[in-house]
Amino acid sequence: MHSILVLMSTVFIYISIIGITGGAIYAPNAKPGCPTHCGNVTIPFPFGIGQNCYINKWFELECLNATAAATSLILKRTKLEVLNISVNHGTLQAITPVTLFNCPNKKEGGTSLRQLTDLKGTPFSFGFGNIFAAVSCGAEAIIDSSFNNTIVQVGCKSTCSSITNSSTATKTINSCDGVDCCKSTIPSPLTPFQIVFRNSSSTKVRENECKYAFFVDETWFGKQVFPINFDMDSVPVNLDWYLDQSSDDWEHFSSMGELVGLVIYTRVNQSSKFRCVCKNGFRGNPYLSGGCKDIDECSEDPMICPEPGATCINIDGSYTCEKPERDTKLLIGIGSGIGSLLVAAMAWGLYKIVEKIKDSKRKKSFFKRNGGLLLQQETSAGKPNFEKTKVFNSKEVDKATENFNVNRVLGRGGQGTVYKGMLADGKIVAVKKSTVVDEAKVSEFINEVVILSQINHRNVVKLLGCCLETEVPLLVYEFIPNGTLSQFIHDHNGDLLLNWQMRLKIAIEVAEALSYLHSAVSFPIYHRDIKSANILLDENFTAKIADFGTSRSVTLDQTHLTTEVYGTFGYLDPEYFQSNQYTEKSDVYSLGVVLVELLTGEKAISLSRSEESLATYFLISMQKNRLRDILHAQVLEGPQEEILIVANLAKRCLDLNGKNRPTMKEICMELEVTKMKETATSNNDQGEAQPIQTLDVIEASFVYSSSSSLQEIPLLSFKSCIVGW
């Protein structure tokens, strides 16, 4: 059956090539001195057999049983048998196993067997032109796989035809229409993990009938007619392949010197992966030096010139049709061309002058549209603590970010994209490029500039300047190297986990910054989007609040009513969501969610929990005395009394009634008390051993009194909670 499959696939491929090239087959080339065929399969470079015949180990082939009747071409590192390789499309056709279920007559047994080859980490992936199919009565098969870094499931379920087990052997499938055979399209590129069968709930399923599932070339599969209990062990499938610009592959082609000549290279999905193709008018193997040959269109199609008496003349990459009076016209054309060149030179010089004037006007227009005049008004208004912000020109910012290279992207948010840059003096900065907004939202951007210009605190990201003469406005900040708190809590690879002391320190620093914004500046500033993704960590893991695009500076007589709800679900104050009235207690609620993230390591919104909202999940756990069950392992290693103090503080911050929540200054002070108790306990431990209580005992007996705790510490100790640093 395997030999028949290879023969059928080879004939199908041969017919397809004839149809594409119109009868003229241009075989891809191998490197000089290297084998060009294995049986009926052509071997083009970058693939090859033998030393120095392939570009890297992934493309090394092996020809087994080299006889005309039984020859197999094997891709050595993946052990896949290859049926065909195309350099023009960057594809190959290989044989993959059929996965079985409930097949006791097979020598491997009756369980699910022979999974697909795992292509993760290879230059190969399951490409377009494939389908996922399952064959048998009531077959229900699923493939768990990865697509664009997301786990996906693809599968199908067949129904049963009205036949009995005894007649199954004579039943044939002409089309896979859902009866005894089902199929499903799959995304590309795809890295499969495992094919699994599910037990069918249908009462019509024929017992003890073997079930099959497989990836397969859709065109090949559509031409097959086979019995339901077909005995195929493998089927052909299409794979995409590519080379890597970040490896030695690129050095090979850049040294050829022909990439700018006859070869075009294309990047795959804006990554370092690439493929090569011959330019229009050339054909051959673009991966070999001199592999792209000119197509002689005149020889291939004698009728290519439709005009009577015209002569076809082949030229590199194209052809031309000439009439007998061509020479006279050519001389006239040359004379006209020289004159045209002189006119064009003058026009080009004039064009450059006009473009320079247009560019200057365009920058002035952008400056006005992006709120430059509004910023000048704010600057001249004499606001307290307002520091003049440096205004960068577009050339400085373009050079710093390498024209906003995608490789310099640090992150994307609701207000724009942040790039890493380096100024002319060598200073590393973060450049925030706002999304394209209408002029009605320009005040939101200028609002961020004005607010950050008033803030001078070590736990708030420092604004260095802005650029307004570009299509969208830009902000230049100090660079914070360690990313966001959210990444360390949820996405970090485990090299460095945040212990309790670090988590408590971060919580205190965030509370200090927000207390400063609410109480110590000339006008209270409400952030309105506090979340772990907006808290950055520097090289010393000092917390800094960022993203002030939706913040508001308010006076005491303002009601803080808004016509549009700002914030992030999971962190949004329910009271604000219902009333559209934002207060300082709304920031307190968001901070409470961040405290719970630090305690549990859970995301603010998750479908994997019994409660999607982390705040609700936490409050229910506290109510049921199950706090220990939801705490992160790193947190459980900390002092248990401190953990409960912070947990109860978070609970008070999440009170649905904003009036019952503590102020930001109270939160800051209570966290400082917790830290000072830790220091005092550490000092006492050096002299006299202290009794140890478990979290369950403390949780059952603890009654918190903020006033008594604060009376034990001098007010001078809380300077950081009310004064900017």
Image (spheres, rainbow, N blue to C red):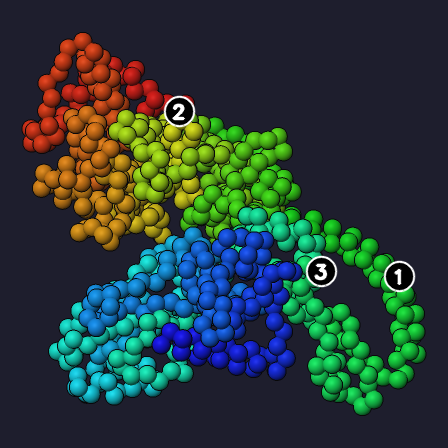
Judging depth in this view, the residue of 232 and 691 nearest the camera is: 232
At 16% from the left and 79% from the top, the residue drawn is 206
Q: Which residue is mark 3?
A: 261
Q: Which residue is mark 1?
A: 342
Judge depth for marks 3 and 2 and give the one in front. Answer: 3
Secondary structure at numbered mark 3: loop
Q: Position of residue 508 (x, y in %)?
A: 30, 28
Quarter residue 522 falls in: top left
Judging depth in this view, the residue of 273 and 370 nearest the camera is: 273
**Mark 3 or mark 1: which comes first in sequence?**
3
Vertical placement of 312 versus 492: above or below? below
Q: Position of residue 571 (x, y in %)?
A: 29, 45
**Mark 3 or mark 2: which comes first in sequence?**
3
**Spatial distance from mark 3 to mark 1, Cα to Cα?**
28 Å
Amino acid type, label 3: Gly
**Mark 1 or mark 2: which comes first in sequence?**
1
Amino acid type, label 2: Gly
State if disc 1 and disc 3 touch (CB < 8 Å): no
- Determine if residue 311 is in view: yes
Q: Which residue is mark 2?
A: 724
- Determine if residue 559 is in view: no
State if disc 2 and disc 1 touch (CB < 8 Å): no
Judge depth for marks 3 and 1 and give the one in front. Answer: 3
Which residue ends up furthest to the bottom in the rendered image?
308
